[in-house]
Amino acid sequence: MITRHDERGVAGSAWISLLVMVMIMAIGISVDLTGLVNAKQKAFDLAHQAGRAAANQVDESEAMMGLTPSIDLGAASSAASGFLDAAGADGTVSVTGPQTLHVTVSVVYQPKILSFLGSRTIAGDADITLTRVVDGTQR
């Protein structure tokens, strides 16, 4: 006598397991892409904040004479580096002119759900221009 196995529901199980995998991937992609965008925004924000800290380090004698002050190279680099160290980010500051500087920051993003993708280094940069404003007008 031949015994028959009841195979009802087997096809449904395969579809449900496939659906669960697709849902996990969709949730993982949405969560990790959002985290990646947030890390990019954080890198740009840190670059601008470090640039502001560096731009505050000016040659006071020029400012006291009413001139647009130049950026103090050593103080600007150490102020920006101190800000980035406190924020836990790596970055560089380069003075590109007497009143301009460029800041580059990198942060590491580790995916939360799709961790098999590995961590990514995200870069952000900012160009800062020091301007003198008197009575609401740039000079």
Image (cartoon, grey):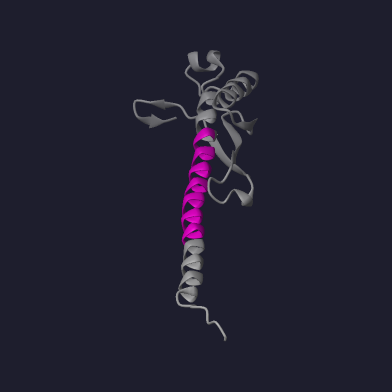
Q: Residue furthest left?
A: 135
Q: Main secondary structure of the magenta part?
A: helix
Please say whether residue 91 is one of the residues in the magenta stretch: no
Front-most of residues 123 and 103: 123
Query: How many marks are shown on the rendered structure?
Result: 0
Residue 46 location (% of width, % of height): 52, 33
| Highlighted magenta segment, given as a residue range | 23-46
Q: Quadrant of the C terminus?
A: top left
Residue at 50 percent of width and 65 percent of height: 17
Q: Nearer the viewer, residue 90 or 117?
A: 117
Q: Residue drawn 53% across and 44% down?
A: 40
Using the image, determine if residue 7 lies above or below residue 98: below
Where residue 83 sits, quadrant-wise, is: top right
Q: In the picture, which quadrant includes the N terminus?
A: bottom right
User: Depth check: 117 or 80 in front?
Assistant: 117
On screen, residue 44 versus residue 108, left or right, reads: left
Depth check: give the residue in front, 138 or 116: 116
Point out the residue furthest to the front here.
1
Q: Position of residue 3 (x, y in %)?
A: 55, 82
Q: Residue 125, image x and y in percent?
A: 57, 40
Quarter of the image holding residue 80? top right
Query: Percent x, y for residue 100?
Result: 57, 32
